[in-house]
Image (cartoon, coloured by chain):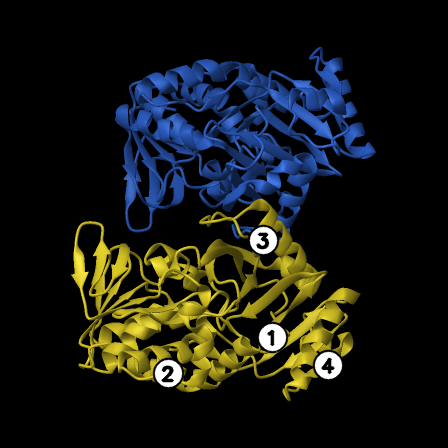
Chain colours: A blue, B yellow
Amino acid sequence: MSGKRTDHVVVVGGGVVGLSVAWRAAAAGNRVSLVDPAPASGASYVAGGMLAPLAEAWPGEEELLELGSTSLNRWPDFADELSRASGLPSGLRTEGTLMFGVDGADREELDTVAGYLAGLGRSVTRLTGRELRRREPSLGPAVRGGLEVPGDLAVDNRLALTALRAAAEAAGVEFIAERAEAVRPGAVELAESTVECDVAVISAGAHSGSLHPALADRIRPVKGEILRLRRRATALPPPTRTVRGPVRGRPCYLVPRDDGGVVLGATQHEVGFDTEVTVGGVRDLLADAETVMPGIAEYALVEATAGLRPSTTDNLPVIGWLEPGVLAATGHHRGGFLLTPVTVDAVLALLRGEEPEPLIKATDPSRLGGQQ
Amino acid sequence: MSGKRTDHVVVVGGGVVGLSVAWRAAAAGNRVSLVDPAPASGASYVAGGMLAPLAEAWPGEEELLELGSTSLNRWPDFADELSRASGLPSGLRTEGTLMFGVDGADREELDTVAGYLAGLGRSVTRLTGRELRRREPSLGPAVRGGLEVPGDLAVDNRLALTALRAAAEAAGVEFIAERAEAVRPGAVELAESTVECDVAVISAGAHSGSLHPALADRIRPVKGEILRLRRRATALPPPTRTVRGPVRGRPCYLVPRDDGGVVLGATQHEVGFDTEVTVGGVRDLLADAETVMPGIAEYALVEATAGLRPSTTDNLPVIGWLEPGVLAATGHHRGGFLLTPVTVDAVLALLRGEEPEPLIKATDPSRLGGQQ
């Protein structure tokens, strides 16, 4: 870096990470442009919005747990700032999470998570099926045991995106509704023009790999199908908090929304850049949801969509300089919403020419071995 | 009737029946207006488009079979005229129908249909599961036996509606994009105005009952949920003709479209004026379809919609004078597309002051016992 104060930052990608970086970079005094043909329409729009570092913890992924826990701790302040800056609700819900299991192998999986977290000094409470149903009466008899994880929260992804866009606009971010084709030091190439800049930030989700050689083949799309349901007048109420867990080995979650909606997800398929919803995916989601919550059959099916998680081989995001003038803040896999506060803090430190906090080291682009 | 030549006909309802009546009445020299806030958007838009009097025949419903068979015979000419008048494809497909059964009770149901039709001199061919799969290799091993019904056809409902609308416009039909609130001799009442006419024709589907006292409580909505699928590159091809039958007692059909699409239907629920698609409905449709055609899991789910069949207690439509100046052509239940040619012929005869053909007698409004 030149050492001078960064003035023109171009963010490529208008998902939760890109919008947040753009908003906060502009609020910090930079001139900011955001390049996206359709902001807030990709994986962030499809997402369930779980902020769940504990429920998603797994032995061997200590760095991801640390990043997620740190970021989750910052979410309440981030949400407050977002509401203030946008004048809109942030969508944060603080009811916590219940995990469940159905068959013996599912419960062993929960035991692994509980034991792992206990070993790290993070306690979760084991619950019987009856205790689960006492907390959430909509859960069915197939649910045999689980965990209470009060610290894991959720955010209404669409409310948050609307607020982020408003906050970015209020901070003076310029929106350029075009698709970026390549990023190099000092320039973001569009189809028929070039946007010059001091720093470019790549936050283009699953498409990031096509924008810079250091990311080529390092960010792969993992398709997720998701259903949006709504309680009908004749139906039992939804759970009051996120309920999630394996259903005979297949991950399933139900995330309630304030408006009576429920987000049901999610499949995981590595099938390239494919966002069609399949019959088999919907069949599996509905079957698992009904196992967990029999009353869901009476809900309305409002929407079926698919998004592409931007995934890396170690499930960690990619945050840091790819070369002078080109920053990456991408590869957030299933954790875009969760990891946004810590990602934004790191990007702002890097834009100021500072070192980000130590836990960001694990996300350094050089670990991926791409062309630097 | 006054005996004078009808000059201004107002058709209430822009589904397949209303659009067809409007088109043909205008082509016959009448001045025609069609009142519908959103033509071609109701049950006709949701429909599967099967033209299947034989597959839907059932002992005791001889008059419906007669009406359906007569109307089906007129479909090829009707489709030709429609294409000529609109310059657009009619959507008619002539590949015929296969019926199937899964469990023993399903096959007994097919035996009843086959025996009934044989007794009426209409022969259908019984097929083993193997013979079914030889004709349609996409059918799965759960399909154990069935019938070949080459005479039952299908029409792409959306192509047909587009063509009907174009034909009506070309014939000079005036479209009034408002909701009718009541129909009386000489007038159709809208929210804030009145359309005067010589004859009003009520073809408002499930909403017909609210328009005239003779239809009150005589036309009830029967909800049908339907899914539209599309073959993905990785998926096996769909059947080449309509395949339908009971799957462990639940009716199921797969109707192929020319563009690689497949229409999958349909649930039947009497739940009032409710067009929400439910989780339970979708779950049942997908499960049954996969039983019939295992490869369908790889198809894309493109659309899930529900429509309201306008149903009567005897499953026959309602065609005839409700009082001087007010005609009914409604209550077509699952047979709107099938019964359109014969309905249009009857309405045009009535508009000319003539008696319609004898088989129309069975559809006389007076049989319903409404207020005349």
Q: Which residue is mark 4?
A: B126
Q: Residue at x 65, y 25 (%)?
A: A137
Residue A326, horizontal then vertical, whole percent: 42, 32
* Residue labelled with disc 2: B356
Q: Is residue B182 left or right of residue A63?
A: left
Tag 2 or tag 1, which sits nearer the N-term?
Answer: 1
Q: Secondary structure at mark 3?
A: loop
Q: Mark 1 and mark 2, same subunit?
A: yes
Question: To which residue does mark 3 refer?
Answer: A278
**Circles 2 and 3 on the same subunit:** no
Is residue B345 in view? Answer: yes
Q: Are marks 1 and 2 in contact (CB under 8 Å)?
A: no
Indicate the amino acid at tag 1.
Ala
Mark 4 or 1, which is nearer the eye?
1
Q: Is residue B342 placed above or below A224 in the rendered structure? A: below
At label 3, which amino acid type do we have? Thr
| Comes first in the chain, label 4 or label 2 | 4
Dot 4: chain letter: B
Q: Residue at x 31, y 43 (%)?
A: A177
* Residue B51 placement (x, y as % from top left): 51, 75
